[in-house]
């Protein structure tokens, strides 16, 4: 049985990979962009696809980011994440908030 805790800390053995590596779905633009950004910026927090959403008829999916449900969309080749105040660039959000998921 797989147990997922609240910690998103890196794997103790390698100290490189997240506990739950992101798995992109074949042919999905958002997933491909997410995978690229996660690798480029070495984000450790688990991100797991939950479902497709037609939020404002955009190319939008819902993901579990750490322990939070987040809407992520691709707009003009920018990955955006919806937070409580609106959309912002995924990279900016993760750089500012990932440490809270790692505690």
Image (cartoon, helix red, strand yellow):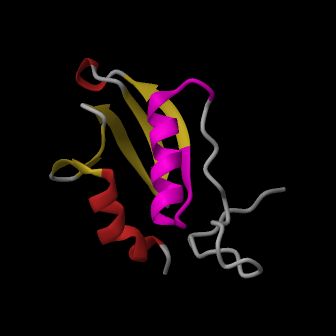
Please tell me whether residue 92 belongs to the stretch shown in magenta. Answer: no
Looking at this view, name the residue that lies furthest to the left.
85
**Which of the two residues, 66 or 10, is positioned nearer the viewer here?**
10
The correct choice, above or below, for 102 with respect to 21 in the image is: below
Q: Quadrant of the N terminus?
A: bottom right
34 horizontally vs 92: left or right: right
Q: Which residues are magenta?
A: 26-48
Image location (x, y in percent) of residue 15: 66, 79
Residue 95: name its quadrant. bottom left
What residue is rendered at 54% in x and 67% in y? 44
Image location (x, y in percent) of residue 86: 17, 47
Residue 75: name its quadrant. top left
What residue is rendered at 73% in x and 77% in y? 14
The correct choice, above or below, for 90 with respect to 17 in the image is: above
Looking at this view, name the residue that lies furthest to the right.
1
Looking at this view, name the residue that lies furthest to the front.
40
35 horizontally vs 70: left or right: right
Give the tally of numbered discs.
0
The correct choice, above or below, for 12 with respect to 2 in the image is: below
Image location (x, y in percent) of residue 21: 65, 56
70 horizontally vs 65: left or right: left
């Amino acid at each position: 049985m797989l147990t997922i805790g609240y910690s998103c800390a890196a794997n103790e053995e390698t100290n490189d990979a997240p506990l739950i590596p992101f798995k992109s779905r074949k042919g999905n633009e958002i997933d491909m962009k997410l995978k690229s950004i996660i690798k480029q910026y070495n984000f450790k927090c688990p991100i797991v696809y939950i479902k497709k959403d037609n939020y404002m008829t955009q190319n939008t999916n819902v993901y579990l980011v750490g322990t939070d449900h987040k809407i992520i969309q691709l707009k003009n080749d920018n990955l955006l994440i919806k937070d409580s105040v609106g959309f912002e660039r995924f990279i900016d959000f993760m750089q500012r908030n990932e440490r809270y998921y790692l505690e």
